[in-house]
Image: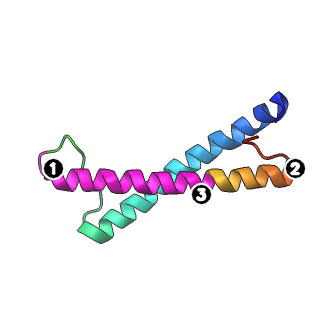
């Protein structure tokens, strides 16, 4: 891909990353509330949650973020190819 098109794609990727973070945060909060009955995921530095609970919440957050990020990045790349005729990874 030409340098110019890579520069044009950068904002698309950045917006996608922000959208992935916001979407995954929402999904994790809703999932954790359904699993545990608590509104917020446990923080690693709080004493009122056990080790296993903190690690499980972190694993859930990581998995949801990775899947959401991949889906949004893929959709952004598909939209970019549709608009420009060029796949951003090439």
Q: Specify the principal SS of the magenta part.
A: helix
Q: How much space separates mark 3 and mark 2, taking CA atoms? A: 20 Å
The structure residue drawn at horizontal position 44% and vertical position 61%, both measured from the top left corner, is: 27
Which quarter of the figure is the C terminus placed in?
top right
Which quarter of the figure is the N terminus placed in?
top right
Query: Label 3's element?
Result: helix
Q: From what the image shows, is residue 78 above or below residue 11? A: below
The tag on residue 71 is: 3
Residue, far front: 90
From the top left corner, tell me how far across and down residue 26 is, in percent: 45, 58
Q: Residues within 10 Å of mark 1 (few under 14, many from 20)?
A: few
Q: Nearer the viewer, mark 2 or mark 1?
A: 2
Q: Is residue 49 magenta?
A: yes
Q: Which residue is mark 2?
A: 85
Query: Label 2's element?
Result: loop
Upstream in the sequence, badge 3 or badge 2?
3
The structure residue drawn at horizontal position 87% and vertical position 49%, both measured from the top left corner, is: 85
Q: Which residue is mark 1?
A: 51
């Amino acid at each position: 891909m030409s340098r110019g098109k890579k520069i044009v794609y950068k904002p698309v990727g950045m917006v996608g990353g922000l959208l992935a973070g916001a979407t995954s945060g929402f999904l994790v909060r809703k999932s954790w509330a359904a699993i545990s009955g608590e509104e917020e995921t446990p923080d690693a530095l709080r004493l009122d949650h056990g080790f296993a609970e903190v690690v499980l919440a972190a694993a859930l957050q990581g998995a949801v973020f990775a899947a959401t990020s991949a889906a949004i990045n893929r959709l952004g790349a598909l939209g970019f190819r549709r608009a420009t005729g060029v796949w951003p990874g090439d």
